[in-house]
Amino acid sequence: MAYELPGLPYSYTALEPHISKSTLEFHHDKHHAGYVSKFNAAVKGTDFDNQPIEAVITSVADNPEQSGLFNNAAQAWNHSFYWQSMKPDGGGKPSGELAKKIDADFGSYDQFAEAFKSAGATQFGSGWAWLVLEDDTLKVTKTLNAVNPLTNSQVPLLTMDVWEHAYYLDYQNQRPSYIDTFLNDLLNWDFVAQNLAAA
Ligand code: MN3
């Protein structure tokens, strides 16, 4: 059964001026769509054909012979998760139970923000920054290329794409500016809270 490309959870102009319509059109309609169609082609006829995409990702993560299937499955999943990690008028500090959990596990919101910025800025080349839950504790991590926390038995709560295609049209080589904007204007804490509650 083919995995379907999910639509964006907002309009193509909804994140402007922070992320342009042009970026979302290329990023969703070309990059994300490309991963989805390559994943569907790679999984077709294999033992994984009818499995949930998360099961495919964790099953083939450690098998170098399945790297094509892994990379496209993980990138299809990562992008779906990334769209939901942003919202119009997002960003800033979380509230309620989530704010308390951030304070308890990082010391303060500012310490979380510094850790997240650093993860995104220091991921050399292409990859992702994440907020995850591991053994009931919040952690910030970064991953290379398509790798995601599902392969480390961590629960993903939030992600930020730091591949150049995520920000180059709007920020050129200024990755730190994109990261600041993600934290201040885009981050969807409702999605984080929902993932934490389900964990
Ligand atoms: Mn991307």
Image (spheres, rainbow, N blue to C red):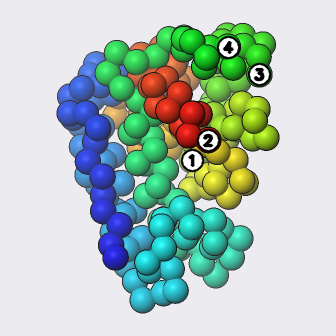
**Secondary element type, mark 4:** helix
Of pointers 1 and 2, the one earlier in the residue sequence: 1
**Secondary element type, mark 3:** helix
**Secondary element type, mark 1:** loop
Where residue 117 sits: x, y (%)?
63, 24
Crowdedness of circle 1 by 10 Å Cα count: few (<14), some, many (20+)?
some
Residue at (29, 25) in percent of width and height: 15
Task: Using the image, tell me which numbered label, if any, was put on residue 126.
Answer: 1
Of pointers 4 and 3, the one earlier in the residue sequence: 4
Left or right: 185 in relation to 131: left
Compared to residue 94, the image places residue 19 above or below, namely: below
Question: Looking at the image, is mark 3 or mark 2 nearer the viewer?
Answer: 2
Of pointers 1 and 3, the one earlier in the residue sequence: 3
Disc 4: which residue: 100
Near-viewer residue (39 or 127): 39
Near-viewer residue (156 or 175): 156
Crowdedness of circle 3 by 10 Å Cα count: few (<14), some, many (20+)?
some
Of pointers 3 and 2, the one earlier in the residue sequence: 3
Disc 3: which residue: 105
Residue 124 visible in image? no
Compared to residue 24, the image places residue 52 above or below, namely: below
